């Protein structure tokens, strides 16, 4: 092993150790099955109801190991067992995941969300919208950040990341910063007393009805209590 390779491995190890200390949630879809996935630290992603029809969901090859495929017509909702890690999320933070969309329709599909529709109360939505990556918190255009039109492609893996350092929200696609917006204190966690029933959901809105379902594959969801910098986002997106 040459010196360059050794230095790269040491840097990657340091990143993993530092990131793990502030890891709020990680689901790789490699441990468990459609009845429930083991996630870190000490969490689980599972169907909201044991009666959910899982016939339109499957485990397939992901970016790393297995990924969760949601097919057209899927009505199952995969929710966090301990939703507080996302319901109470406050800056600084990083949300990151791998996604692949396999059909043009629907034009709007949720990857990860804590609340349905735009609400001033708090919460967020990370989603696909007409081949754009979008992150929305609160209510109104001032609480939405999006990528340029047409930068996401069908049947292609994309790494999506959002960071919030307390002042600025940055949206990354494939480790490239594509949009930034000042937050000015508008990002809020969900009020637990009123919105406790909203379980953070992968692949659909966290509501009582089926809406804006993602059709494709999702893999390696990360949430950190830290705003990763550009170099750290690159390491996360290029981890093999």
Image (cartoon, rainbow, N blue to C red):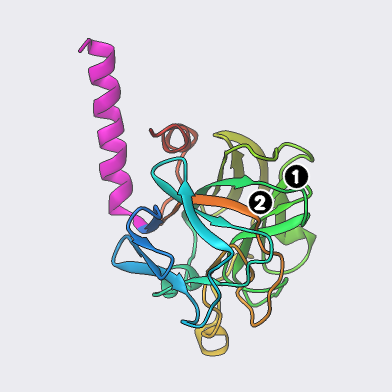
Residue 81 in picture, x, y percent from top left: 40, 75
Residue 137 in picture, x, y percent from top left: 65, 64
In depth, the one of 2 and 72 nearer the eye is 72
Regarding mark 2 in the picture, which secondary structure is present there?
strand
User: Which portion, as a residue range, is magenta?
Assistant: 1-23
Can residue 164 be seen here? The reply is no
Residue at image location 78% in from the left, 54% down from the top: 107
- On whether residue 71 falls in the magenta region, the answer is no
Quickly name the residue at label 2: 182
Residue 84 in picture, x, y percent from top left: 43, 74
Quickly name the residue at label 1: 131
- Judged by its main secondary structure, the magenta piece is helix
Residue furthest to the bottom: 193
- On whether residue 16 falls in the magenta region, the answer is yes
Residues at marks 2 and 1, CA–CA distance in whole angstroms: 23 Å
Regarding mark 1 in the picture, which secondary structure is present there?
loop
Q: Earlier in the sequence, mark 2 or mark 1?
A: 1
């Amino acid at each position: 092993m040459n010196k360059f390779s050794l230095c790269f491995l040491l840097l990657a190890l340091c990143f993993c150790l530092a990131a793990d200390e502030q890891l709020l949630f990680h689901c790789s879809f490699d441990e468990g099955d459609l009845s429930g996935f083991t996630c870190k630290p000490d969490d689980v992603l599972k169907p909201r109801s044991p009666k959910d029809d899982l016939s339109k969901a499957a485990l397939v090859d992901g970016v790393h190991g297995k990924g969760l495929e949601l097919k057209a017509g899927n009505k199952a909702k995969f929710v966090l067992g301990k939703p507080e890690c996302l319901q109470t999320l406050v800056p600084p933070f990083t949300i990151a995941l791998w996604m692949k969309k396999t059909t043009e329709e629907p034009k709007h599909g949720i990857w990860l969300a804590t609340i349905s529709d735009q609400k001033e109360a708090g919460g967020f939505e990370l989603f696909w919208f007409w081949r754009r990556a979008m992150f929305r918190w609160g209510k109104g255009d001032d609480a939405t950040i999006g990528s340029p039109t047409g930068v996401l492609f069908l049947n292609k893996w994309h790494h999506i990341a959002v960071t919030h350092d307390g002042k600025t929200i940055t949206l990354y696609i494939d480790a490239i910063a594509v949009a930034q917006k000042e937050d000015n204190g508008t990002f809020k966690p969900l009020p637990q007393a009123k919105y406790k029933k909203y379980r953070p959901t992968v692949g659909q809105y966290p509501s009582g009805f089926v809406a804006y379902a993602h059709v494709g594959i999702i893999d390696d969801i990360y949430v950190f209590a830290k705003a990763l910098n550009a170099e750290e986002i690159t390491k996360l997106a290029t981890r093999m």
